[in-house]
Amino acid sequence: MPSRQLRCSTYDHTERRPAARLPQTVIAMQPIQLFDPESSTFTYLLVDPHSGDAVIIDPVDHQLERDLAALREQNARLLWTIETHAHADHITSAAQLIEHTGAQAATPAGCGIQPAARQLQDGDVINFGGETLTAIHTPGHTAGSMSFLWRDHVFTGDTLLIDGCGRTDFQSGSADALYTSITERLFTLPPETTVWPGHDYKGRTKSSIGHERAHNSRLAHRSRADFIALMDALHLPKPRRIDEAVPANLQLGVQHHAGADDSEAPRVAAGYAGDVTPELAWRWWQSGKGVVVDIRTNAEREWVGFVPDAPAVAWKQWPGMAMNPDFDAQIQALSAAHGGKPLLMLCRSGVRSIASAKRATELGLTAYNILEGFEGDPDSAAHRSTRGGWRHRGLPWRQN
């Protein structure tokens, strides 16, 4: 198969970032760097040019459509979503990407992100096509933080930034551990290794190990004791979204609120009517207040199970998880057949159902998302239906 071309940006050391856009096309084997201005977060898409297999590092929830567009543009198949740590300043889109693409999640074992299919240890390798990405345990910003080495590129998350480093005053952070991670793990990489940080707040995009080792204002020519004293004296404000972001990121970005099981009222949501628990959806359906709509694939309903008498309108189709081109017409017809009652969207874990509820709302219908979906989130053994979901909660279902 001929080599493919990827889109990427080329810069030297700390060159300024251009206006927001997808990077320009050049020869393959460079990462695709994407930027979220709200959280100043960099997301990285790596694509094997021969197979089209891809991984994405540190995706952001509200940039889901951007990232899906980048995958389509590259004709890429996403195999893995990867987190450098459990973020405190934004929410990952890992769970949504998994639902949309069939990818799996890989996260640092020390971060406690239990739903991830793979818990990475230092030195573990992620394969995509003919390419490999190697995990480097770099604790300090958080106890579980990791960096990832691909060819002569290192993705440092919040461990090493351009002319800086991540804070160490929360999530079991340690200035002492961070100093070791940077000086003994990262600064020992070849000096020409390109550094791709998790954030930048001054318009810069990348640096190099050699440049940071010589010029990083927090670390260059600074002793361990001096570095620890510097970090201890920062007194930074608490991240604005930490109370929301960390719990969600421990579930790959899925937000389940305490006390939801007992709620008699839907929760407000952006872009659709709201979120309802499985129990509330069942009561609404039995009382005639709404209609449960199974938006999973035909294969999921056949193999995993289904809700008796629930109408089905697939949001995506198996194999390939391609969009159902007839979704709009089918969901409008279903709504009309049920007198315009609210539609209660049910998927596997409560992610695709959000996307379908938003689309139904755009079509002028009233649509809710059923939290946790049919199977719920995976547990520490990557098994579903043990931590929530329609089946786990004892609501009616059948299996062929």
Image: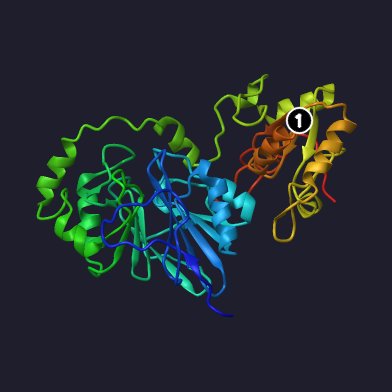
Vertical order, 376 against 71 (above or below): above
Task: Give the residue at the far bottom of this rendering.
Answer: 1
* Residue in the foreground of this view, choosing between 148 and 117: 148
Residue 156 position by quadrant: bottom left
Residue 193 seen in the figure: yes
Q: Is residue 159 left or right of residue 301?
A: left
- Residue found at x 9% / y 55%: 221
- Residue found at x 10% / y 52%: 222
Label 1's element? loop
Residue 10 position by quadrant: bottom left
Q: Is residue 319 left or right of residue 151?
A: right
Task: Give the residue at the far front of this rendering.
Answer: 19
Q: Is residue 281 left or right of residue 84?
A: right
- Residue found at x 58% / y 64%: 76
Please name the residue that numbered disc 1 is placed on. Answer: 365
Vertical order, 369 against 9 (above or below): above
- Residue found at x 56% / y 80%: 2
